[in-house]
Image (spheres, grey):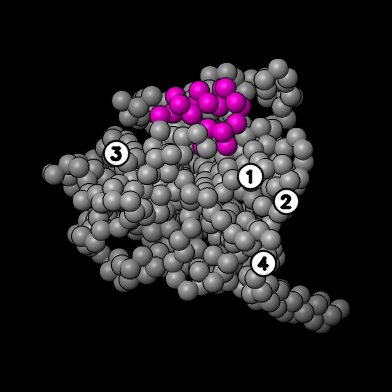
Amino acid sequence: MDVRTQSIPTGETAFPLEPIIRPGRNAWRSAKAEKLAFLIDGEDYYSRLDQVLRQAERSVFIIGWDFNPEILLRPRDPDGETLGALLRRMVEEKPSLEVRILVWGMGPVYSGKSFKMFGKMDWNDHPRIFLHFDFDHPLRASHHQKIVAIDDKTAFLGGIDLTARRWDDRSHSIVNPLRRSPDGTAYGPVHDMQTIVTGDTAKLIGDVARRRWKKATREALAPLETPGENPWPGDLEPALTDCNTGLALTEAWKWKGHRGHREAIRLTHDALKAAKRHLYIETQYLASFGVARTLAKRLRKADGPEIVVIVTRESHGFLEKLMMGNNRNRLIRRLKRADRYGRLRVFYATASDGNGGEQEIIVHSKLIIVDDRFVRVGSSNLNNRSEGLDTEADLAIETSDPAGRQAIAALRNELIAEHLDAQPAEVARILAETGSMLAAIDRLNVKPRGLRSYDVDTDNGETESLVGTGIIDPKQPFWPIPEIKAGIRRLFARLSHHRLL
């Protein structure tokens, strides 16, 4: 169904819809998803991945910022095997299966595995398990996509890497004996998102995986045509079927003579501009002043949408605290000054310790929901480096049919309910009664676990980015290096031309 011809009722009025997803502008390509579901938090993702991985016959791609073969996909199972052991057993049992794993070269260093991952280990000492570390990035850039593609039939894409400190269940309890790294170290609650898709969208994600693999290894692989049903967890009800999707990429801008890809940031801006009533955002980082300008324009308009942003308040490391933390405060101050009509709320999520204390739930998800018609889930944070330096992949879902709109509204309500320790039906009821996400949050945010306002001094303080942001959180490769190289190439070309004359 073409969204250009549709209207969506908003109370007693209706507004015409223009498509948000536009291939060639804000999407690398578009495709139809046969089935699609939203997987909330690590337990849901890992358990679904475990179910589907076991059905792989010919190809498994794992593309990530980091990878840890020692994690358990099912920590509740006392006999559960590690991810590495599972992959090794699968290739031994299935003679046609090949497993390819592409990891950012610095990922193991940042995550503390250092050089342990570099070399053959028991799990990957097999001719059909290929592990490659990707170092071919601009200075300070990273490979940040989080993808698993299986037989070109089923794929997972979102914000969750297959590594330590990503698993958590929906309760986000402060104390959870299962929430431990492979070395036994406990870590705090974490919230994240992933998607599972089948059909042409899964093939499209497979194309991205092959594309990344070829860039990193120079090995070109053909798409697969495998007969049979598309693997899908038997107990998982798809949220949407036969829905429109777009895949947006980010690749280093002006790197090695290429202009790269910036569909993802265009998709973000176009989605923010398209919201009519409700804009729900979850983001680890809120440090893009370009995004802030777009949001501020929406807040200054009398007929703009409500905007709820859930962020991570805690910052790790000196540079992150200095740059991301301070820029986040300045950005929120700017947005609050622009909020003329009281439609903005910025929160961080907390869990209760049962004794009057609380701990922050780290929000690692990268999610945008526009009204009840558009969702973007992926790897892109709302910071500068995700706009044109790091390698990112985001999946967008757009729908105009009633069932699809209901599914997107249900996702938003379920996420709000999770953060408030409430029932999605309660959120839906208040939204139906008031038309307001803010009203629903205010009424239900009364339990020990909940959302806390991200407060900044609105009257005093800076609203521009810190000096040095372009170095610590750059939008593209550092301009002198490629520009100098390009200039030298042009100079030699001119000299050669004159000599020929």
Q: Amino acid at mark 3?
A: Ser
427 drawn magenta? yes
Q: Position of residue 170 (x, y in %)?
A: 34, 40
Secondary structure at numbered mark 1: strand
- N-term mark: 4 or 2: 2
Q: Which mark, by number, is residue 338?
A: 2
Q: Position of residue 313 (x, y in %)?
A: 48, 58
The mark closer to the camera, 3 or 1, is 1
Disc 4 crowd rating (10 Å Cα; few below 14, some 14-19, many 20+) is few
Give the CA separation, mark 4 to mark 2: 14 Å
Residue closest to the eye, 423 or 138: 423
485 drawn magenta? no
Give the CA separation, mark 2 to mark 1: 9 Å
Q: Amino acid at mark 2?
A: Ala
x 74%, y 24%: residue: 15
Residue at the spot of label 4: 461
Q: Count every numbered label the image shows and give the total.
A: 4
The mark closer to the camera, 3 or 2, is 2
Residue at the spot of label 3: 47
Q: Amino acid at mark 4?
A: Gly
- N-term mark: 3 or 4: 3
Secondary structure at numbered mark 2: helix
